[in-house]
Amino acid sequence: MEYRINKRTGDKISVLGFGTSYIAEAKETDAVRTICRAYEGGVNYFDLATAEGKTFTYFGKALGDVRENV
């Protein structure tokens, strides 16, 4: 994965992000598995702005242990 440095914060951010527009249409188990797989592949930028409220729990389950890294 390629990363860029945020000049304001110094954070290392993946050039690929994970949008959430359609994740609400997936089964919870599939959604959590997909989010985990993206993180394992190096994605550390997840855009929740357009997500439905129910998807927040998906991200909590998938990324709760690594929250400080995303």
Image: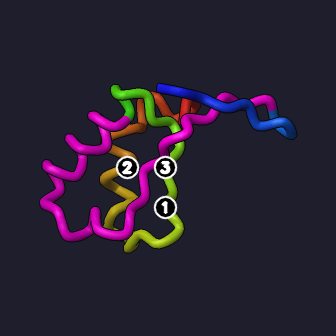
Residue placed most toward the observer, 64 or 42: 42
The quadrant in which the C terminus is found is top right
Kind of residue at disc 2: Phe
| Kind of residue at badge 1 | Leu
Q: Quadrant of residue 53?
A: bottom left
* Residue 50, above or below 67: below
**Nearer the N terminus, badge 2 or badge 1?**
1
Contact (Cβ within 8 Å) of mark 3 with mark 2: yes
Residue at the location (26% across, 68% down)? Answer: 24
Left of 3 or right of it: where is 37?
Answer: left
What SS does tag 1 mark?
A: loop
CA separation, marks 2 and 1? 9 Å
Query: Marks 1 and 2: in contact by CB < 8 Å?
Result: yes
> Could you say which disc has been placed on residue 48 in the image?
1
Render colour scheme? rainbow
| Percent of width and height locating residue 18 | 42, 50
Do the residues bearing badges 3 and 1 touch, measured as CB atoms within 8 Å? yes
SS under mark 2: helix
Point 20% across, 70% down: residue = 25
Query: Which residue was labeled with disc 2?
Result: 59
Report the amino acid beneath label 3. Answer: Phe
Q: Is residue 7 above or below residue 42?
A: below
Residue 2 position, x and y percent, is: 54, 27
CA–CA distance in space, label 3 to label 2: 9 Å
Give me the C-alpha separation between circle 3 and circle 1: 6 Å
Residue 33, quarter of the rendered image = top left
Can you say whether 49 is above or below 57 in the image?
below
Bounds of the magenta segment: 10-38
Q: Which mark is residue 46?
A: 3
